[in-house]
Image: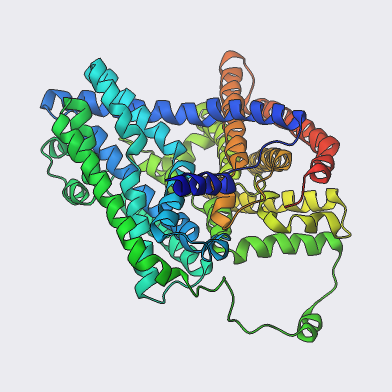
Amino acid sequence: MNRYLTLTKTFTKAISMSAPQDKRRKVMIVILSLFGVFGVLLPVSVGSGLLVKLMTETLIPLGKGPMGIRLIYHLICLLTVVFGINVVFNEFYFSNDIEYLLPWPLRAHQIIASKFTSTFFSENMMQFVLVLSCVVGYGIASGMGVLNWLLSIIGIITLPIIPLAYCGILSMLVMAFTKVIRNKDVIQKISVALIFILVIALVASIGFLKDMDIDNYVETLAANDQPFFTVMNYVFPNVTLFVKFFTECDLLALLAYIGVNIAVVGVMLALSELLYFRGVIGLTSAGKGKKSKSLDKLIAKSKMHKASYSYFLKEVRMLVRTPVFFTNCIAVNFLWPIFVYAMYRVQSNPPTIERMRQLYAINDIKMQLFILLGVVGVSVIVAAISSLTSNAISREGKHFSFMKYIPVPYQTQWDMKVLVGIIFPSAGILVYFIPACIILHIPALHIVLYTLLCLMSITFVSYMGIYIDSIQPKLIWDDEMSALRENYNTFFSMAISIGFAAVVCVGGFFLFCKTRLTIGMTGLILMLVLAIANAVVLRLTAKNGARNIEEQEET
């Protein structure tokens, strides 16, 4: 037990972000944390709770109130498996501490139990909040008693155990009996493929949204006649038992829930004794085994460029050639129309392209205001979600010292990282938006106005993101996914961006509605607001950016 606790504490500390190094950074982290709580965590929690509340209120008259929360929990567990596979593989087999652990007199189950525990707590903080918000939504709708609330705490803390244990079992079976995965690159590509499969499934399902009869769906949900439920009840029995014991105060279901979790974790630990060392010994690091190029060939193929351009190419190549960075930071910029299309299809009577064209031609106020504010909102959110700049310094990792010692000014490096963060989101938005404007016959002057609003919004988010990352970058990570998912700076940047977009869009809406300003004048005022925001963040970066990098300790 002592070894387990010591290892768990060590692993958890190793994958956590380092503590702020001075008082100024501590104050900034506290302020950013408040933005994160009120800008992302609280809205997502409230939204999830309201969704479960509405589903529960609809299903209670049919005598199937818990079915809604069961559906959400099944989805949460499924997504935990999909996004947890890469994390578990990397933590179990490809972390930098493996070569130091193997010579020690440690049993396989001790290593796996400790790594599993540290991964469980570090990867599921957001999930804990989601599970809690769903319980609150259900409890309000159903009027739960005190005992129900107390019992729900057990499931709130432990629901992600089985999905992550499945990832652990799968990783050990694959590594012990196949040669499919021998380095980080392969598992990253598999994770990317799974994410794209989810996206394709989402796109395929959008076509059914328009004709979906919500009443029939609720009836089939209440009748437990959904194939999804049939499969998920077998795959994740913990969900059914959790919902049963906290909604009905069923102690037998509670004991069964505890037993199922112990059984699955026990299987994982038992397999670790049989398979873990077999799979981990002899692993090679990513890229080993490839023929190394001679120095002469590398020099012969090298070309001389300006320092700024070379640094820009370095950033682009890092993002494009790393599967995790490519998927999470670049590809996401081009996927946002899927969600816009889904919102369009779920409307009961969506306007046709011809109708939208006519509305814009007659200067319909609602249509023009929707596009004006939509450009700002989408630009800010897409740039924030791509997180190209909010982890730009963290992506350097153990090579952070490279930034300090190359003969390139900090400001140049800073600007090139921001430029990358501006180009990809801008391309991802304008490649769809400009053709849409042409199809809708929007005047050229309006297109220019919208394009400027888009670029100014993305520029603000990009400079703000890298400034946040420079305060306390996450430089210690074993795999690229950790640099993204375990980096609080991305979360902070997203929170501030969402809050900024809400203030600008809601403010623009009320400004237009409460005054007699034209759409053009409203757009110019929005440009002025964005210009001021950009000036403020540029001032911050010019004043503190280089100092933040200089004062940052090397790893």
50 or 291, nearer to the observer: 291
Residue 468 horizontal side relative to residue 68, left or right = right
Instruction: Please give the name of the residue rendered at 52% of the width and 44% of the height, measured from the top-left corner.
Output: 9
Q: Give how far across and how far down residue 173 sits, in percent.
A: 34, 67
The answer to whether residue 206 of the structure is visible from this angle is no
494 or 245, nearer to the observer: 245
Is 266 situated above or below 364? below
The answer to whether residue 227 of the structure is visible from this angle is yes
Tell me the colour scheme of the image. rainbow
182 or 282, nearer to the observer: 282
Q: Give how far across and how far down residue 263 sits, in percent.
A: 24, 50
Instruction: Please give the name of the residue rendered at 57% of the width and 30% of the height, measured from the top-left corner.
Output: 36
Is 326 situated above or below 178? above
Quadrant of the image occupied by residue 324: bottom right
Count the numbered circles shown.
0
Instruction: Please give the name of the residue rendered at 82% of the width and 76% of the height, measured from the top-left corner.
Output: 303
Q: Give how far across and how far down residue 122 sits, in percent.
A: 49, 43
Quadrant of the image occupied by residue 538: top right
Residue situated furthest top in the rendering: 514
139 or 423, nearer to the observer: 139
Q: Give how far across and how far down residue 61 sits, in percent.
A: 13, 23
